[in-house]
Amino acid sequence: MACHFRIAARGAKIGLPEVELGVVPARGGTQRLTRTVERARALEIMLLAKKLSADEAFAVGLLTEVYQPDELDERVLERVMTSEDLREGVTALFQKRPPAFKGK
């Protein structure tokens, strides 16, 4: 929730998994959630450990974009490609390999 763009694939479940363990969400999760979605929905997610589908999360403003799973990588890459090194870093992450940065 601390991101400018919150993008997910259909089939994703969005929630606060810490709550299921009886732990208070870290890194401002509860505060950010109440600032991102309406109070009643935020309380439902926090107090009941409710998980939203990607489409539900988009409808309440928790996600900014939702794509089919096979389109997700391509759409995310389109969003973040501003330098060769950034493209390489993101591509390497998706391909699960070390990046080969060139300083460009």
Image (tube, rainbow, N blue to C red):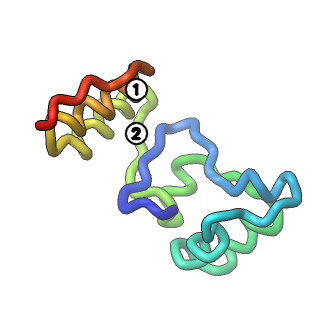
Q: Earlier in the sequence, mark 2 or mark 1?
A: 2
Q: Amino acid at mark 2?
A: Tyr
Q: Position of residue 101 (x, y in %)?
A: 23, 29
Residue occupying the point 70% across, 52% down: 51
- Above or below, comparing residue 70 to residue 40 in the picture: above
- Provide residue 48's location: percent of width, then percent of height: 82, 63
Q: Is residue 29 above or below residue 64?
A: below
Q: Nearer the viewer, residue 36 or 88?
A: 88
User: Going by the image, does 90 lie left or right of 42?
Assistant: left
Direction left: furthest residue: 104
Q: Check disc 1 and report the residue beneath it.
A: 94
* Residue furthest out toward the front: 103
Say which of marks 2 and 1 sits in front: 1
Distance in Å between CA atoms under marks 2 and 1? 16 Å
- In the figure, residue 33 lies in which quadrant? bottom right
Q: Amino acid at mark 1?
A: Phe
Is 86 above or below relative to 41? above
In the rendered image, which residue does mark 2 sit on?
Answer: 67
Image point (45%, 29%), residue name: 69
Can you give x and y, in whole percent of width and height, for residue 86 in the image? 24, 39
Mark 2 Cα shell of 10 Å, populated few (<14), some (14-19), many (≥20): some
Where residue 66 is drawn, which disc sits there? none
Judged left or right of residue 10, residue 104 is left
Give the structural element (helix, strand or loop) at label 1. helix
